[in-house]
Amino acid sequence: MTASPISHQLHATSLSRALPVLGDWWTVLLIREAFVGVRLFSDFQSRLEIPRQTLTNRLRELVAQDLLYKRLYQDRPVRHEYRLTAKGLGLYPYALLLWKWQRRWGQQSPNPLPVRLTHTNCGQTMEPVFGCAHCHQPVGLRDVDWHARAATAPATATATATATATAIATATAAPAPRTTRHTVTRAVLDDARLYRHGAFVTADRWTHLILSCAFLGVTTFDGFERELGIAPNTLAQRLRVLVEARLFDKRPDADDSRRFQYRLTDRSRDLFPISMALVQWADAWMPASDGPPMQRVHRGCGHALRGVVMCSACSQPLAPREVRFEHTTAQVAEPA
């Protein structure tokens, strides 16, 4: 399918580099567990009920991607623990925002997430808030304008959506930087697990890319198919899942009753900060040689948006060692 002319002016997005690394169900859950202090192979296996060989493979990949490192803690027999590297700790904003989405929209799972976060710098119980580093105000989907980097004026919503989404599709068509690509199974994409884990959005590459198109204004089946170059049957299956998960509101097109519009819901708009945190992590740790193709501008203050995850009580940025988290029965150690 021929790409739109404006798409030829764009380069690969940061998202397209992040998803081959994190676009896997088990990988996302392992990173989540690492942030709540899980370090041992046996603990990962028991908490996630993950097959042993699958766990071995994913941990090996996370070490190869420099997200985790192995540390010897026992000589006889030899035993290692897995700790987050600096690159892995860079995903902390992403992990915090996943926690927030899960607390609001998800369901309880066999291994519930922490119920309370405390910012040790101010001593207050808080929630993570995605905001602008310049003005320290909260930022949501409707607070961001998108500019083509080479343009002198903001692109229209339709042109921006077309260009950005097509650039994503072009970049993701290239082979992933790892040797193994994992796909989400139908068992994962059923209703119960969708409602249970917000992680499924980044754990499935196509789901995340479809949502990214929707964030930029795409609303129709034809539009998603054109901008992503996705197979119609794959698109139909993912759209069905997104509708069942109440992330899209499917309604007849006002101009053509044979077609449908797929509109974002409050539940899916709340995923926008998570996607942005992932993009900014890739900007920092997997940058393109000539920078990101799009400039994000915060409407509230007019400055280029550098998103930061802040404390809801004091509006200061949150760092891993400055957040204490508690479960219902016991406090978990810091992730280090």
Image (cartoon, helix red, strand yellow):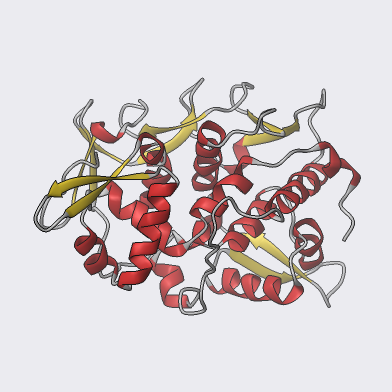
Q: Position of residue 30 (x, y in %)?
A: 34, 57
In the displayed structure image, the side of residue 125 where residue 289 appears, left or right: right
In the displayed structure image, the side of residue 6 where residue 284 appears, left or right: left
Q: Is residue 26 above or below residue 324?
A: below
Q: Is residue 23 visible?
A: yes
The residue closer to the viewer here, 234 or 80, is 80
Q: Is residue 68 above or below residue 53?
A: above
Picture quarter with the C terminus? top left
Q: Position of residue 69 (x, y in %)?
A: 31, 44
Instruction: Name which residue lies at 49% across and 61% down.
Output: 24
In the displayed structure image, the side of residue 17 where residue 230 appears, left or right: right
In the displayed structure image, the side of residue 47 where residue 30 appears, left or right: right
Instruction: Name which residue lies at 58% across and 28% down.
Output: 305
Q: Is residue 11 above or below residue 250?
A: above
Q: How many marks?
A: 0
The residue closer to the viewer here, 56 or 98, is 56
Q: Is residue 102 visible?
A: no
The residue closer to the viewer here, 50 or 235, is 50
Instruction: Name which residue lies at 48% across and 78% down.
Output: 190
Q: Position of residue 203 (x, y in %)?
A: 49, 60
Instruction: Name which residue lies at 90% across and 56% down.
Output: 2
Q: Position of residue 118 (x, y in %)?
A: 22, 38
The residue closer to the viewer here, 285 or 109, is 285
Picture quarter with the N terminus? bottom right
